Image (cartoon, rainbow, N blue to C red):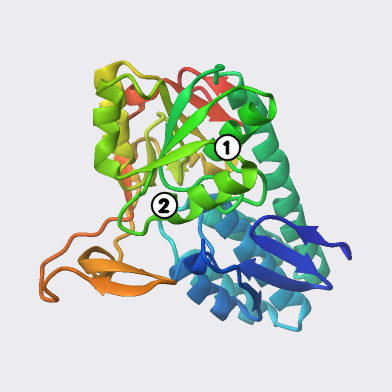
Amino acid sequence: MFMGKIKTLSLKLEDQKLFILDQTLLPHKELWVEVLSPEQMCDIIVQLKVRGAPLIGVAAGLSLALYAIGGATENEYLKACERLRSTRPTAVNLMWVIDQLIKAATTAYNPEELFNMAVQFCQEDIELCQKIAQAGAELIKDGDQILTHCNTGGLATAGVGTALGVIAEAHRQGKKIHVYVDETRPLLQGARLTTWELEKLNIPYTLICDNMAAHLMSLGKITKAIVGADRIATNGDFANKIGTYTVALSCHYHNIPFYVAAPYTTIDFSCSRGEQIEIELRSPAEVLGVHGAFESVIWSPKTANTYNPAFDVTPAKLVTSWVIDRGVFTSPTF
């Protein structure tokens, strides 16, 4: 059984104890929380203390594996799997990891083997992110001014990230680039998290409101955009953080390349088109105001009617290229 340590930007595994970095407190406070049960991990995921499709899958898998080696019966383990599987219905990586662990457990319930599998999923994601970064960096040119949306770095994966990993690799290669960061309403993952990562990486950036991107494009200030994905259909349509579709439309109008970066584990081979992707709806409170380590501010009438989808679906026809760990694809022939 794996007895080593894993330390990433947002996850630690040491002495068979799992810790996650509470992302709701960033960028002003870095607090590591020990995950003591799958039930606690459900709350952590729903509260977005851990987020990002690849990272959710990895973290959930590790919490389940630790539950198994801690003495859970097969029945208890399988019930915990189902609870975790339902926490974020759009993020297919979560389902992919848990389905693999369920399959293994129902074949032969071996806690040590389940733990080794969960660790392997984490290590695989690290490798996949590096391959995405290297493939995507070839699309980035010296002098590019790149728009990104939401957070797609080491806070969303076990590795260097997807879209942000591409940007980081291009910077590491010495390319002079500048990043425009959408704040990403309503939960400000760009303003709070992407800026935090870019500062750690010493990559020049400018934070903008989401509704400023098209204006900057019209001024020639943005040369390309790259985003992540939570689920990709086999026809290339993909779900990502709400507002991504708007970015894609603006890029299309201004003839700006629009790329999506994700590992193969984000491709849902049972989903043929974007209309089939279930979109998670979240609490009205996220739209009525803003919440975080800075406490809460409510700027709307508490009785205001709201609509708060966590994701939108971008049609494949708006995508210039898909950057997968297997390479760069100009058509959805994954």
The 10 Å Cα crowd at callout 2, few under 14, some 14 to 19, many 20 or more, is many
Q: Secondary structure at mark 1?
A: loop
According to the image, label 1 marks what residue? 203
- The picture places residue 231, in percent across and down from the top left corner, at 45, 44
Q: Which mark is residue 279?
A: none
Q: Residue type at mark 2?
A: Ala
- Callout 1 touching callout 2 (CB < 8 Å): no
Q: Residue 285 vs residue 265: left or right?
A: left
The image quarter in which residue 113 lies: bottom right
- The picture places residue 101, in percent across and down from the top left corner, at 66, 61
Q: Residue type at mark 1?
A: Ile
Q: Quadrant of the C terminus?
A: top right
**With respect to residue 239, does 136 lie above or below?**
above
> Quick check: can you spot residue 258?
no
Q: Which mark is residue 191?
A: 2
The 10 Å Cα crowd at callout 1, few under 14, some 14 to 19, many 20 or more, is some
- The picture places residue 67, in percent across and down from the top left corner, at 70, 77
Q: Residue 320 vs residue 101: left or right?
A: left
- The picture places residue 174, in percent across and down from the top left corner, at 67, 24
Q: Residue at x 25, y 30 (%)?
A: 214
Q: Residue at x 60, y 73 (%)?
A: 78
Q: Residue 284 vs residue 77: left or right?
A: left
> Quick check: can you spot residue 241?
yes
Q: Secondary structure at mark 2?
A: helix
| Disc nearer the start of the sequence (1/2) | 2
